[in-house]
Image (cartoon, rainbow, N blue to C red):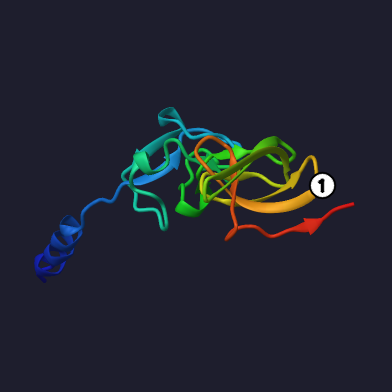
Amino acid sequence: MNTIPLVLPLVVALAGQAAADSLVAAHTIRSRTIISAGDVQLVTDALPGALSDAEAAVGMEARVVLYAGRAIRPEDLSPPALIERNQIVPLIFNHNGLAITTDGRSLSRAALGDRVRAMNMQSRTTVSGTVDSHGRVLVGPTEMTFSRTE
């Protein structure tokens, strides 16, 4: 019996598959930790849903605990938070040459570009705005929603 014709196609089929790199945690990473290059490593296994590029993870924040040797998926990461809950932040209203700045207290964590609600410290009014790259909350006529807290 000749088994070579059966084995050869299997070997050729396996050799034709490119090994996919997958990104895994080099050690256990706690949630809310900013990922650095030393926190991740590429393995040659094809892990379902895993990122394949370390640059996509470096600088991002872990949303969940990432365990050593386990795949890092895109939904496990988010941009780093610039504003923490209860942090005092500048509220900036800028419209048609009128600029008003006051202090507010953030009601949640938020990253660059996120919508966040904040309480104006003087009027106790809750406003919504967008976080800018300096950690300020930009409020404007199209973004503002008010609610009075007593």
Residue 2 lies, in percent from the top left, at 9, 69
On screen, 7 above or below 106?
below
Q: Is residue 64 visible?
A: no
- Quadrant position of the N terminus in the picture: bottom left
- The reply, left or right, for residue 34 in relation to residue 6 is right
Q: Outermost residue, front direction?
A: 97
For mark 1, does the 10 Å Cα neighbourhood hold few (<14), some (14 to 19), or many (20 or more) residues?
A: some
Q: Amino acid at mark 1?
A: Arg
Question: 142 and 8: which one is in front?
Answer: 142
x and y percent of residue 136 in the render? 59, 39
Q: Nearer the viewer, residue 65 or 114?
A: 114
Callout count: 1
Secondary element under disc 1, as helix, strand or loop, is loop
Q: Position of residue 129 (x, y in %)?
A: 61, 51
Residue 7 versus residue 67: which sits nearer the camera? 67
Find disc 1 in the rendering and name its residue: 124
> In the drawing, does residue 23 fall left or right of residue 150?
left
What x and y, as percent, mark residue 31? 61, 40
Which quadrant of the figure has residue 131?
top right
Residue at the (43%, 28%) spot, across then down: 38
**Which residue of the protein is positioned furthest toward the bottom in this rendering?**
1
| Residue 43 appearing in the image | yes
Q: Residue furthest top?
A: 38
